[in-house]
Amino acid sequence: EAGVTQFPSHSVIEKGQTVTLRCDPISGHDNLYWYRRVMGKEIKFLLHFVKESKQDESGMPNNRFLAERTGGTYSTLKVQPAELEDSGVYFCASSPDRFGNTIYFGEGSWLTVV
Amino acid sequence: AQSVTQLGSHVSVSEGALVLLRCNYSSSVPPYLFWYVQYPNQGLQLLLKYTTGATLVKGINGFEAEFKKSETSFHLTKPSAHMSDAAEYFCAVSGPLKNQGGKLIFGQGTELSVKP
Protein backbone atom coordinates (compact mmCIF):
# COMPACT_ATOMS: atom_id res chain seq x y z
CA GLU A 1 0.00 0.00 0.00
CA ALA A 2 1.38 3.38 -1.00
CA GLY A 3 2.01 5.87 1.78
CA VAL A 4 1.38 9.59 1.82
CA THR A 5 3.20 11.09 -1.12
CA GLN A 6 4.19 14.71 -1.56
CA PHE A 7 5.42 16.63 -4.55
CA PRO A 8 7.78 18.35 -5.12
CA SER A 9 10.23 17.07 -2.57
CA HIS A 10 12.34 20.21 -2.90
CA SER A 11 11.57 23.60 -4.37
CA VAL A 12 13.58 26.81 -4.61
CA ILE A 13 11.68 29.90 -5.70
CA GLU A 14 12.20 33.63 -5.60
CA LYS A 15 10.35 35.92 -3.27
CA GLY A 16 7.07 36.96 -4.85
CA GLN A 17 6.66 33.83 -6.92
CA THR A 18 3.99 31.20 -6.50
CA VAL A 19 4.49 27.62 -5.42
CA THR A 20 1.98 24.80 -5.30
CA LEU A 21 2.60 21.77 -3.17
CA ARG A 22 0.69 18.58 -3.73
CA CYS A 23 -0.22 15.78 -1.35
CA ASP A 24 -1.69 12.40 -2.18
CA PRO A 25 -3.02 10.75 0.97
CA ILE A 26 -3.29 7.05 1.57
CA SER A 27 -6.17 5.69 -0.44
CA GLY A 28 -9.40 5.71 1.53
CA HIS A 29 -8.23 8.20 4.14
CA ASP A 30 -10.86 10.90 4.48
CA ASN A 31 -8.77 13.00 6.86
CA LEU A 32 -5.90 15.00 5.46
CA TYR A 33 -3.67 17.42 7.37
CA TRP A 34 -1.07 19.99 6.46
CA TYR A 35 1.71 20.95 8.82
CA ARG A 36 4.83 23.02 8.40
CA ARG A 37 8.10 23.64 10.12
CA VAL A 38 9.78 26.90 9.39
CA MET A 39 13.43 27.25 10.25
CA GLY A 40 14.21 26.96 13.93
CA LYS A 41 10.62 26.52 14.99
CA GLU A 42 8.42 23.62 15.95
CA ILE A 43 6.18 21.72 13.57
CA LYS A 44 2.83 23.49 13.44
CA PHE A 45 -0.61 22.46 12.30
CA LEU A 46 -1.98 24.36 9.33
CA LEU A 47 -5.31 22.78 8.48
CA HIS A 48 -7.47 19.68 8.39
CA PHE A 49 -9.67 18.39 5.59
CA VAL A 50 -12.41 15.84 6.00
CA LYS A 51 -12.98 14.67 2.46
CA GLU A 52 -13.22 17.88 0.46
CA SER A 53 -14.32 20.09 3.35
CA LYS A 54 -12.08 22.21 5.54
CA GLN A 55 -12.71 21.02 9.07
CA ASP A 56 -10.22 23.29 10.77
CA GLU A 57 -8.03 25.92 9.16
CA SER A 58 -7.05 27.71 12.34
CA GLY A 59 -3.34 27.25 11.69
CA MET A 60 -3.17 28.91 8.27
CA PRO A 61 -0.79 31.84 8.76
CA ASN A 62 -2.35 34.36 6.37
CA ASN A 63 -4.29 34.74 3.15
CA ARG A 64 -1.24 34.06 1.00
CA PHE A 65 -1.85 30.40 1.72
CA LEU A 66 -4.65 28.54 -0.06
CA ALA A 67 -5.40 24.87 0.43
CA GLU A 68 -7.78 22.82 -1.63
CA ARG A 69 -8.85 19.22 -1.81
CA THR A 70 -10.78 18.61 -4.95
CA GLY A 71 -13.09 15.62 -4.86
CA GLY A 72 -11.76 14.58 -1.49
CA THR A 73 -8.69 12.95 -2.96
CA TYR A 74 -5.39 14.78 -3.33
CA SER A 75 -4.77 18.19 -1.84
CA THR A 76 -2.79 21.21 -2.92
CA LEU A 77 -1.30 23.99 -0.85
CA LYS A 78 -0.55 27.15 -2.78
CA VAL A 79 1.62 29.96 -1.48
CA GLN A 80 1.13 33.20 -3.41
CA PRO A 81 3.16 35.35 -3.26
CA ALA A 82 5.90 33.52 -1.39
CA GLU A 83 7.88 35.38 1.25
CA LEU A 84 11.28 34.57 2.76
CA GLU A 85 9.69 33.50 6.04
CA ASP A 86 7.73 30.79 4.23
CA SER A 87 10.90 28.74 3.82
CA GLY A 88 10.72 25.45 5.62
CA VAL A 89 9.32 21.98 5.25
CA TYR A 90 5.66 21.33 4.62
CA PHE A 91 4.32 18.01 5.80
CA CYS A 92 1.12 16.34 4.74
CA ALA A 93 -0.51 13.60 6.79
CA SER A 94 -3.57 11.44 6.45
CA SER A 95 -5.69 9.35 8.75
CA PRO A 96 -8.68 7.07 8.35
CA ASP A 97 -10.43 8.69 11.34
CA ARG A 98 -10.56 11.94 13.29
CA PHE A 99 -9.45 10.46 16.58
CA GLY A 100 -5.72 10.36 16.04
CA ASN A 101 -5.19 6.65 16.42
CA THR A 102 -3.23 6.36 13.23
CA ILE A 103 -1.73 9.33 11.46
CA TYR A 104 0.67 8.83 8.60
CA PHE A 105 3.04 11.55 7.46
CA GLY A 106 4.57 12.11 4.08
CA GLU A 107 8.23 12.86 3.60
CA GLY A 108 7.64 16.57 3.31
CA SER A 109 8.11 19.25 0.70
CA TRP A 110 11.17 21.37 1.42
CA LEU A 111 10.59 24.96 0.31
CA THR A 112 13.31 27.56 0.03
CA VAL A 113 12.35 31.13 -0.83
CA VAL A 114 15.28 33.32 -1.91
CA ALA B 1 -4.20 25.63 25.76
CA GLN B 2 -2.29 22.48 25.12
CA SER B 3 1.49 22.56 24.87
CA VAL B 4 4.44 20.22 24.69
CA THR B 5 7.88 20.88 26.11
CA GLN B 6 10.92 18.85 25.21
CA LEU B 7 13.79 19.41 27.58
CA GLY B 8 17.01 19.85 25.66
CA SER B 9 17.20 20.74 21.99
CA HIS B 10 20.38 18.67 21.66
CA VAL B 11 21.27 15.45 23.46
CA SER B 12 24.50 13.57 22.94
CA VAL B 13 25.15 10.02 24.12
CA SER B 14 27.80 7.42 23.54
CA GLU B 15 27.04 4.31 21.55
CA GLY B 16 25.67 1.68 23.92
CA ALA B 17 24.55 4.23 26.51
CA LEU B 18 21.03 4.87 27.71
CA VAL B 19 18.96 7.27 25.64
CA LEU B 20 16.52 9.47 27.59
CA LEU B 21 14.58 12.18 25.79
CA ARG B 22 12.24 14.18 27.98
CA CYS B 23 8.74 15.34 27.13
CA ASN B 24 6.22 17.12 29.31
CA TYR B 25 2.80 18.17 28.16
CA SER B 26 -0.11 20.22 29.35
CA SER B 27 -3.60 19.18 28.46
CA SER B 28 -7.00 19.70 29.99
CA VAL B 29 -8.20 16.28 28.90
CA PRO B 30 -6.55 12.86 28.71
CA PRO B 31 -4.40 13.19 25.63
CA TYR B 32 -3.09 10.91 22.98
CA LEU B 33 0.70 11.14 23.03
CA PHE B 34 3.17 10.42 20.27
CA TRP B 35 6.85 10.27 19.55
CA TYR B 36 8.00 10.82 15.98
CA VAL B 37 11.50 10.57 14.54
CA GLN B 38 12.95 12.36 11.56
CA TYR B 39 16.14 10.96 10.10
CA PRO B 40 18.28 13.28 7.98
CA ASN B 41 16.54 14.24 4.75
CA GLN B 42 13.54 12.05 5.49
CA GLY B 43 9.99 12.56 6.67
CA LEU B 44 8.34 11.97 10.02
CA GLN B 45 8.09 8.39 11.18
CA LEU B 46 5.95 7.27 14.09
CA LEU B 47 8.03 5.67 16.83
CA LEU B 48 5.25 4.93 19.29
CA LYS B 49 1.99 6.27 20.66
CA TYR B 50 -0.11 6.18 23.79
CA THR B 51 -3.87 6.28 23.49
CA THR B 52 -5.36 4.26 26.33
CA GLY B 53 -4.48 1.20 28.39
CA ALA B 54 -0.97 0.22 29.41
CA THR B 55 1.10 3.24 30.28
CA LEU B 56 4.38 1.72 29.15
CA VAL B 57 4.38 1.77 25.40
CA LYS B 58 6.87 -0.06 23.22
CA GLY B 59 7.74 1.21 19.80
CA ILE B 60 10.00 0.46 16.90
CA ASN B 61 13.78 0.17 17.02
CA GLY B 62 13.84 -0.70 20.72
CA PHE B 63 12.34 2.56 21.96
CA GLU B 64 9.74 2.81 24.67
CA ALA B 65 7.94 5.55 26.57
CA GLU B 66 5.95 5.71 29.74
CA PHE B 67 2.88 7.86 30.24
CA LYS B 68 2.91 9.33 33.74
CA LYS B 69 -0.26 11.29 34.31
CA SER B 70 0.80 12.60 37.72
CA GLU B 71 3.94 14.07 36.19
CA THR B 72 2.35 15.00 32.85
CA SER B 73 5.31 13.33 31.19
CA PHE B 74 5.94 10.97 28.32
CA HIS B 75 9.71 10.45 28.27
CA LEU B 76 11.30 8.35 25.54
CA THR B 77 13.98 5.82 26.40
CA LYS B 78 16.17 3.21 24.78
CA PRO B 79 18.52 1.06 26.86
CA SER B 80 21.42 1.08 24.41
CA ALA B 81 22.02 3.72 21.76
CA HIS B 82 23.09 2.79 18.26
CA MET B 83 24.75 5.03 15.73
CA SER B 84 21.67 4.71 13.53
CA ASP B 85 19.54 6.37 16.22
CA ALA B 86 21.04 9.75 15.39
CA ALA B 87 18.06 11.83 14.29
CA GLU B 88 15.63 14.46 15.49
CA TYR B 89 12.87 13.32 17.80
CA PHE B 90 9.52 15.01 18.30
CA CYS B 91 7.00 14.56 21.06
CA ALA B 92 3.40 15.45 20.22
CA VAL B 93 -0.02 15.56 21.83
CA SER B 94 -3.33 15.36 20.03
CA GLY B 95 -6.00 18.03 19.98
CA PRO B 96 -8.27 18.46 22.99
CA LEU B 97 -11.46 17.34 21.32
CA LYS B 98 -12.17 13.79 20.28
CA ASN B 99 -12.51 14.75 16.65
CA GLN B 100 -9.20 16.64 16.74
CA GLY B 101 -7.04 13.60 17.12
CA GLY B 102 -5.05 14.43 14.03
CA LYS B 103 -4.43 18.00 15.07
CA LEU B 104 -1.10 17.43 16.74
CA ILE B 105 0.76 19.89 18.90
CA PHE B 106 4.47 19.25 18.65
CA GLY B 107 7.36 19.98 20.92
CA GLN B 108 10.33 21.83 19.52
CA GLY B 109 12.27 18.65 18.82
CA THR B 110 15.41 17.09 20.28
CA GLU B 111 18.41 16.39 18.11
CA LEU B 112 20.07 13.16 19.25
CA SER B 113 23.73 12.62 18.48
CA VAL B 114 25.42 9.29 19.08
CA LYS B 115 29.17 9.22 19.58
CA PRO B 116 31.20 6.11 18.73
Image (tube, coloured by chain):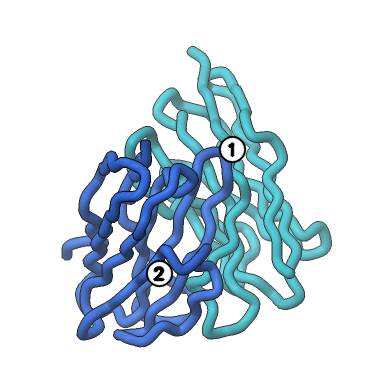
Chain colours: A blue, B cyan
**B33 on left or right of A55:** right
Report which residue position mark 2 lands on. Answer: A33
- Using the image as rendered, state which of residue A97 and residue A42 is in the foreground: A42
- Farthest front residue? A16
Q: Which quarter of the picture shows residue B30?
A: bottom right
- Farthest left residue? A1
Report the residue at 48% width, 49% height from top: A37
**B23 on left or right of A15:** right
- Using the image as rendered, state which of residue B29 and residue A54 is in the foreground: A54
Q: How crowded is mark 2: few (under 14 residues within 10 Å), some or many (20 or more)?
A: many
Q: In this view, does B37 lie above or below B20?
A: below
Q: In this view, does A2 lie above or below B64?
A: below
Q: Which quarter of the picture shows residue B31?
A: bottom right
Whether tag 2 and tag 1 are in contact, CB under 8 A, the answer is no
Quadrant containing the N terminus of chain A in the rendered view: bottom left
| Residue B110, numbered circle | 1
Report the residue at 30% width, 75% height from top: A68
x then y, percent, for residue A44: 53, 58
Report the residue at 43% width, 48% height from top: A83
- Using the image as rendered, state which of residue A66 and residue B68 is in the foreground: A66
x then y, percent, for residue A81: 36, 56
Q: What separation in Å lies between label 2 and label 1 (alpha carbons)?
A: 23 Å
x then y, percent, for residue A66: 37, 70
